[in-house]
Amino acid sequence: MIKDFIGNTPLRRDEFLSKRYRTNILIKEEFYNPGKSSKDRAAWFMVEDAIKRNKIVEGGTIVEASSGNTGISIALIAKELGYKSKIFVSASCSDEKIKLLESYGAEIERCDNSNGLHVFNSTQYLAQAFCSNNPNTYFTNQYYNSNNIKAHYKTTGPEIWQQTNAAVTHVLVGVGTGGSISGIGRFLKERNPQVKIWGVEPKNSVYHLFMENKPIPEEEVRFDAIEGIGRTFIPGAFDKQVVDHIFQIGKDKSVSMAHQYLEEQGELLGFSSAAVLAALDEHVDKMDLKEDDQLVLFFPDHGSRYINKLYQDHHPHKKIKENFNASI
């Protein structure tokens, strides 16, 4: 069963980055999941919970609002379990993700924005409306589903703790729905309250305002388009109590770091992963990292999902590594 292949992803020490930043840099490689992203974890927990609670029966349609990766995970799992899937994607969803969704049999509906349930024509609003008007459908609603947090509390957090032999000191995570950082942070801080949990969001996203107890703008906010992270609203899946700080990063810097990492290491970073690395590079002086610290960079996605957006006009001198076994 697909469940048996989700999670237990590698945690790799990056010697090159460790030397550059003079500390221990560990990469949590989530593209080893079957759907090539960390979203497989939350998708499984949400779908399994819905089936157990009889919210949907076999042959029904599982619905999600997604920038792409969660939708792919939902579609993959739905197909495996004998369900249909309908994914409401934002206009920014990459062509590669659309093709993958189609290959898994998902019905796709493109939407104007992904600005929350309260915004007309958003992915979330239309997904909810569809389920309200169609029988045997279930909206997993990753933004407000506690199983999004639970997935990372039950799997990712414990894996990081075990793989570092309880020595992890810092974790740097991109923040989209908030599920990953909240689940990881909650588990690790229960084990050691001194572990620093840092988030990464695009410039002009609103998480940093929430962390600083500042009002969220009522008018529509446009933030740097880094696919997979950033929000104009605060989802219920985000737990600020377990997050120490949010770093902001620009799209251009993220693209630049993706290209640089490809040149130096021959690996294709996904957009969110590149943003995490870019945040480290731009804000490392503020992080006060020691030589014996263990900083985990959470890389949730793979660059093969963003060829047109990140790498179309970039021709690396180094051969691209094929060191992952995730399915496409």
Image (cartoon, helix red, strand yellow):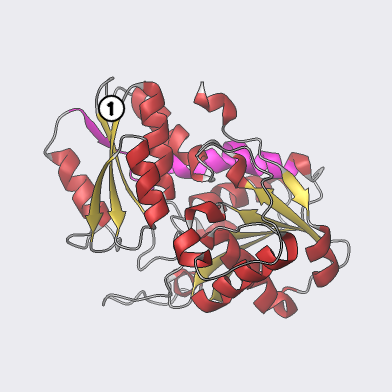
Can you give x and y, in whole percent of width and height, for residue 178 in the image?
48, 55
Q: Is residue 100 above or below residue 245?
A: above
Residue 136 placement, left or right of 273: left
Question: Could you tell me if residue 174 is visible in this image?
Answer: no
Residue at x 47%, y 40% (from the top left corner)? 42
Question: Could you tell me if residue 97 is visible in this image?
Answer: yes
Residue 72 placement, left or right of 11: left
Residue at x 74%, y 50% (from the top left corner)? 192
- Residue under pointer 1: 55
Q: Main secondary structure of the magenta part?
A: helix
Residue at x 79%, y 46% (from the top left corner)? 164
Is residue 150 rendered magenta in the image?
yes
Circle 1 crowding by C-alpha within 10 Å: few under 14, some 14–19, many from 20: some
Dividing the picture into quarters, in which one does residue 132 lie? top left
Can you give x and y, in whole percent of width and height, for residue 248 in the image?
54, 75
Disc 1 element: loop
**Highlighted range, magenta:** 136-161
Residue 296 placement, left or right of 78: right
Can you give x and y, in whole percent of width and height, for residue 263 in the image?
70, 67
Dividing the picture into quarters, in which one does residue 262 lie? bottom right
Q: Nearer the viewer, residue 286 or 6?
A: 6
Say which amino acid is labelled 1: Lys
Is residue 214 rendered magenta in the image?
no
Can you give x and y, in whole percent of width and height, for residue 302 in the image?
56, 52
Residue at x 56%, y 71% (from the top left corner)? 254
